[in-house]
Structure formats: C-alpha cells, structure tokens
Image: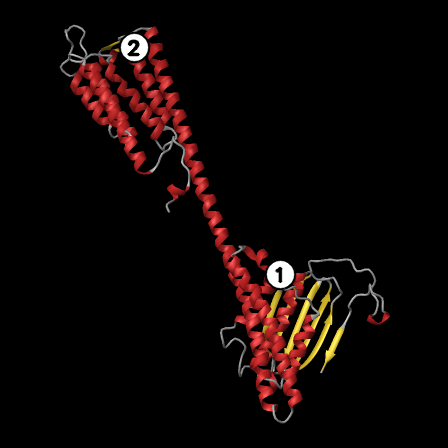
C-alpha cells in the first residue's frame, strides 16, 4: 500500500493520476480561453500573439517563472505593435487575451517554490499596468488609459494575486499536514516494530530460561535415576519425582508463553500479565533441584521483605536459575556453587560463583552454544538499569555478578531478627548449604 493511499489528502491538493489529469485539463481550458479571446480581434497579429500566449500557458506548472516572462514579453510586443492610426491596428492593446498575464502571474504565485517569486510577479504586473496606462515616453509608448482604468487594472490584479496566494498557502498547509500524517504513521509503525522486537526478545528469554534449566535438571536427574535404579530405588524414586515436578513447572510456564503468542498482545506488559509471579523464595526451590542433580549449593539471600518489585524479584530469580543451569551443563554434577543475593544501599547485588568441578577455567566456556543465557541475563539487568559482568575465575570455575538499583522503596515496619516470631518482621537472611 502506498503512502498516498494511506494518508487522506484534502481536495485542494489531489495526488496521483487524478491530479495529473485535472491539472492538464485546467491548463488546456485556460489556453483555450486565451485563444478564443484573441480570435475575436481583427488585427493581423492578435491571433498569433494570443496563440503564443496560450501555448506558453501549457507549461505554467513546470516553469511558472519562464512562462510569465514569455507572456510579459509577448504583451510588450503587443503594445509596441498597437498603432491607433491604423484601422484595424496590427495588434489591439489592451485586449481581452491579455488575461494570459494574470493567468501567468497566478501560476507563479501558486506553483513557485521560491519565496520571493510571488511578490516579484505581482509587482511586475502592477508596474506593467501602470506603464501601459500612463505610457513610457523613451520607448515611444503612449498611455491607453487614465487613473480610473489603472485602479480597475490594479484591483483586478490584486484580487487575482490574493486568490492565488490563498490557494498557495492552502496547498502548502495541505502538504505539511500530509507530510506530518506520513511521519506520524512511520513513527507508529516504528514503535510497533520496536514493541514486537522487545516482545520477541522477552519471549525468547523466557523460553530459554524455562527450556534450558528444566531440561538440564531433568536430563541429569534421569541419568542419575538410571544409574541407581537397581542399587538404590529410593534415590531413583526421588529423582523421578524431581523430574516430574520440574516438568510440570516447565509445562505451566510454556502454556503461559504460548497463550501470549496466540493472543498476540503487543508490548511486554501484556506478556507479563499471564506469567507466573516468581519471588525470591523460589530460589530455594531451584537450589534444591540443583542439589538433587549433584551440585553443592551454598545459598544466601539477604533482602528485606517487600523491598523489591515483582519484576526485580523475577530478574534475580532468572539470573540465579540460569547460573545453576550453566553450572550443570558445563561443570557437571560434582561442582560447588556459591550464591549471594543481597540488597545494599538501594542496590540489589547478585554474586554467583562455581568451582567448575575442578576443571581449568576456559576448558568449556559458557556460551559455546551461542551464549543465549549470558545474553538474556545481560539484557534483563540492563533493562533494569543495572550492570552485568560474567567471566572465568582465576584457576577454575566461573563467576557472574549483577547489580541493579532497587526502584521499589516500600517502607519496612520493624526490622527484627527472624527468630522473634513477629509477623511484621522482615526476611533478613536465609542461608542454606548442603
């Protein structure tokens, strides 16, 4: 679909084939009017001069300045050929076909793109009518009118000029409105594209978090269950229960994401409405699953309750989840992971380090499959206005550090220790190690 078909254009500024046909019809009509007016005169040169003026008017839209210069020159020739002593004179002056001068002036005012041209055209016609009325002695040109005739000529000239200038102003306004409408439409399309890109990026992050973590845990648990199926049925049963629970959570998240895709709601706000709210408490759940998969996890969460917004808690949870997934994939089930989540001076700090299972750093770097996990974590942190850092440790293992400003400043009623039993107490520290 073209821009002209999308943007409504006022009748004063038609576009496309309709504009070209209408403009050509108007040009032909004006030329015929001048030609018919010249046909009524019996002078030897009247018809020729009128025909030349009419022919020049056919190019008035593309070359308005040139057309006016040609018509003015032909009008001067007409007045020079006028001889009152001869009957009929070679050319009558003034004559009805001199209306071509007004048509040419109107074309300059309406179609010229140069700001000073409309005023120059109007001034030239006023000077020409003044000279024709009172004469130009050094050219041997006598005047053909008086003061009253001059006022009539000037009044007619000013009326035509003002009408053309009003049309010119209206055309520029219509063009500016159409350009503004096209610009607004392009901006709207650009915003829609950016919203779609953000939505795809967020859904891609969610899919990666759900699929990568869940599959990593399920595969390791399935391998472990198969290894101890005959020797330790209880451990195998526990692993199978973990697989089932992880699969159910993954299915629930996948259903929510697919529902967002089917409904096709733009933007990230709609996508977040159907997602399961994730809190910092669920970090312990993924840590337990990682432990059952063979990791040694040391977890410490030191954040006041109600201090973080749901989006910030989701970001912290996803970062920890992705770090555990990467450790399972690249370091193996014998690795040790140290997780620290704390809030300090209005900043949420997340530190996750692992020992790489004893392997030298860089042997199997995170990102060998494309680095989608690192990219997703970085995007989440930067979207929250924070900083992200990830890389190998000296010796063996990997570290991930993220810091984000805490935007939700919920007042905390009473800060007491967790052992007081006060229901208003905040969560000051949760530390587990297995």
Residue 401, image quadrant: bottom right
149 vs 113: above or below: above
- Could you say where residue 412 lies in the image, as x and y percent from the top left? 79, 60
Of mark 1 and mark 2, the one earlier in the sequence is: 2
Q: Quadrant of residue 210?
A: bottom right
Residue with the mark numbered 1: 384
Mark 1: secondary structure: loop
Cβ atoms at labels 1 and 2 below 8 Å apart: no
Q: Position of residue 148 (x, y in %)?
A: 34, 6
Nearer to the camera, 384 or 161? 384
Left or right: 97 in relation to 404? left
Q: Which percent across, then down, holds residue 30?
A: 26, 23
Quadrant (top left, top right, bottom left, bottom right) of the C terminus: bottom right
Q: Nearer the viewer, mark 1 or mark 2?
A: 1
Residue 331 seen anywhere in this rendered image of the structure: no
Q: Is residue 41 above or below residue 268?
A: above
136 or 422: nearer the eye?
A: 422
Dot 2 corresponds to which residue? 133
Tell me how far mark 1 sits from mark 2, CA to CA: 80 Å
Residue found at x 53% / y 83%: 363
Disc 2 residue crowd, few under 14, some 14–19, many 20+, Cα 10 Å: many
Q: Which mark is residue 21?
A: none
Could you tell me residue 360's position as x and y percent?
57, 85
Give above or below for 337 relative to 12.
below
Q: Looking at the image, which is closer to me, 432 or 40?
A: 432
Q: Residue at x 69, y 58 (%)?
A: 407
Front residue of this view, candidates 161 and 350:
350
């Amino acid at each position: 679909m073209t821009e002209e078909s999308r943007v409504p254009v006022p009748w004063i500024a038609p576009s496309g084939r309709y504009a070209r046909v209408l403009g050509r019809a108007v040009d032909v009509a004006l030329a015929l009017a001048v030609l018919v007016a010249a046909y009524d005169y019996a002078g030897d040169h009247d018809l020729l001069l009128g025909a030349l003026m009419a022919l020049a008017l056919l190019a008035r839209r593309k070359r308005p300045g040139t057309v006016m210069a040609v018509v003015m020159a032909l009008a001067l020739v007409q007045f020079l050929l006028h001889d009152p002593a001869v009957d009929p004179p070679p050319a009558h002056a003034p004559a009805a076909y001199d209306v071509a001068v007004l048509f040419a002036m109107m074309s300059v005012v309406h179609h010229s793109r140069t700001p000073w041209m409309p005023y120059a055209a109007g001034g030239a016609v006023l000077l020409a009518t003044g000279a024709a009325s009172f004469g130009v002695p050094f050219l041997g040109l006598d005047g053909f009118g008086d003061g009253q005739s001059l006022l009539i000529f000037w009044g007619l000239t000013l009326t035509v000029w003002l009408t053309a200038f009003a049309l010119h102003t209206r055309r520029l306004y219509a063009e500016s409105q159409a350009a503004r409408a096209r610009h607004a439409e392009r901006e709207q399309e650009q915003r829609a594209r950016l919203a779609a890109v953000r939505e795809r990026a967020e859904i891609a992050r969610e899919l990666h978090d759900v699929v990568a973590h869940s599959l990593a845990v399920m595969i390791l648990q399935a391998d472990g269950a198969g290894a101890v199926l005959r020797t330790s049925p209880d451990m195998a049963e526990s692993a199978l229960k973990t697989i089932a629970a992880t699969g159910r959570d993954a299915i629930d998240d996948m259903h929510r994401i697919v529902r967002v895709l089917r409904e096709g709601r733009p933007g990230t706000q709609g996508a977040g409405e159907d997602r399961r709210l994730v809190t910092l408490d669920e970090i312990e759940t993924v840590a337990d699953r990682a432990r059952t998969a063979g990791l040694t996890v040391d977890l410490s969460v030191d954040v006041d309750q109600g201090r973080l917004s749901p989006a910030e808690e989701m970001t912290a949870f996803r970062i920890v989840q992705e770090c555990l997934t990467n450790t399972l994939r690249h370091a193996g089930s014998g690795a040790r992971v140290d997780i620290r989540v704390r809030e300090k001076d209005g900043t949420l700090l997340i530190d996750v380090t692992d020992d790489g299972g004893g392997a030298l750093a860089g042997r199997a770097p995170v990102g060998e499959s494309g680095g989608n996990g690192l990219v997703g974590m970085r995007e989440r942190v930067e979207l929250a206005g924070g900083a992200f850092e990830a890389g190998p440790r000296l010796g063996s293992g990997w570290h991930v550090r993220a810091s984000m400003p805490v935007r939700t400043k919920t007042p905390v009623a009473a800060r007491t220790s967790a052992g007081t039993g006060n229901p208003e107490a905040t969560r000051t520290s949760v530390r587990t190690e297995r």
